[in-house]
Structure formats: C-alpha cells, structure tokens
Image (cartoon, grey):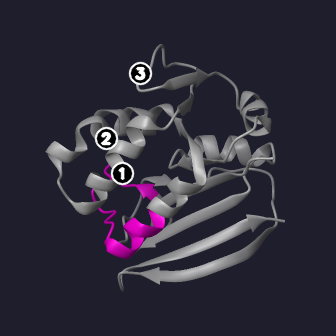
Amino acid sequence: MRKIMYYVHQSLDGFIEGPNGEFDWAQLGPELGDYSMGLTERADLFLYGRTVWTMMSSYWPNAESMDPDEHAIQFAPVWRSTPKVVLSTTLESADWGTRIVRSPEEIRAIKEEPGRDILLTGSASVAAALTELGLLDEYHVIVHPVILGGGKPVYQPTDRRNLRLAETRSFDNRTVLLRHDLV
C-alpha cells in the first residue's frame, strides 16, 4: 500500500504561518532543496488542502519566471506534471491535473490504489484529519530558525498517536529535520 508523507515547514515555536498568514520565513537552501526533491521522487501524487493548493497553484505554474532559484527551476516542471488531489469542501474547480475530494475518507481509497507514495505538503487541517484516520505514515517536519510568536499551529488537536523517531538531520547549517513514522 502507498504511504502518505506529510512534509511541513514550521517555526521554532511550532507555527506553519505567522499571525497574519505570512509564509515568507521558510527558506530552502541547496541541501533542503535536494531533500525536498527526494520526497517528490518517491511520490506520484501531491495532496493539498484548499489554502495550500491556492498558494501552490498561483506560484508553481510560472515559478521559473518569477523566482529563478535552483529549487524553482527543478521543482516547477515536476509540480506541473504530477497529478494532484485537493481535499476541500469549498473549492469548486482546479486545474493542473487536479482532482477535488470532499472527505478525508476518500483519501483512504486513493491510498489503496496502485502507485508510488503520496506527498502531503503543509495543510495542517488535512494532516490532522488524516492523522485521526490513521492514514499518515511519515511526518517530515522541517524546523526553521525563526520565532513567529503566533499564527497557525503545525498540529491541530487529534487523538493521541505514538510515533517512532526515524531520522534527524540538519540542512544548510540552518534547518533541522524531525522525521517520525507512525508506529
């Protein structure tokens, strides 16, 4: 069965966005960019919530012309060509090879389909819903050296889950990976 990997950036004080919704503090250096690309190579489906989908779909289709850094040049064509699923009760339509599902339960059926792993990026509410259903297999949390002092927490309340520490490492002498697997 496919695994669902949750890949998320957080501040040292545990937020995925600042008090005003800002996400201008997460920086990918070359090592973190390589790690990120390694996760995309394991996946043949990207999973988002509506908010992250809106952000991704407004940036990645033309990222090379807006931000010509190495990660944008590498990831933009991968993003455009990889099928995507958005879990949303409000999104009416989506382009770029994107399917909309309305219930976290629908993700279970997608997970059981043949294929490589599924990469969930950001989307704390989707991660919480999938955690409650026992559908998230790996948590790839990147901790950035910034204190935001408030905002949206990386984890929404869910039932207690025991996880196993699978890996820790630093990237670019700046960020730290905390990877945990579902026990």
Instruction: Work out whether mark 1 precedes mark 2 in sequence or the reverse, and give the earlier one.
Output: 2
Residue displayed at 30% across by 59% down: 71
The amino acid type found where label 3 is placed reads Asp
Tag 3 residue: 95
* Start-end of magenta stretch: 16-36
Say if the magenta span includes residue 31: yes
Q: In the displayed structure, does residue 59 sit left or right of residue 108?
A: left
Relative depth, front residue between 152 and 38: 38
What residue do we see at 31% from left, 66% from top?
27
Earlier sequence position, callout 2 versus callout 3: 2
Q: Amino acid at mark 2?
A: Trp
Find out whether the residues at labels 1 and 2 contact each other: C-beta distance under 8 Å.
Answer: yes
Q: Residue at image x 56%, y 23%? A: 99
Residue 124, percent across and down?
A: 56, 47
Q: Which residue is mark 1?
A: 75
The Cα atoms of the two marked residues, 1 and 2, are separated by: 8 Å
Place of residue 113 in the rendered image (x, y in percent of width and height, measured from the top left):
76, 34
**Mark 3 or 1, nearer chain start:** 1
Q: CA distance from mark 3 to mark 1?
A: 18 Å
- The relative height of residue 108 versus residue 141 in the rendered view (above or below) is above
- Given contact means CB atoms under 8 Å apart, are the residues at marks 3 and 1 in contact? no
Residue where numbered disc 2 is placed: 60
Would you say residue 64 sits in the magenta stretch?
Answer: no
Q: Secondary structure at mark 1?
A: helix
Q: What type is the residue that disc 1 sits on?
A: Phe
Q: Is residue 149 visible?
A: yes
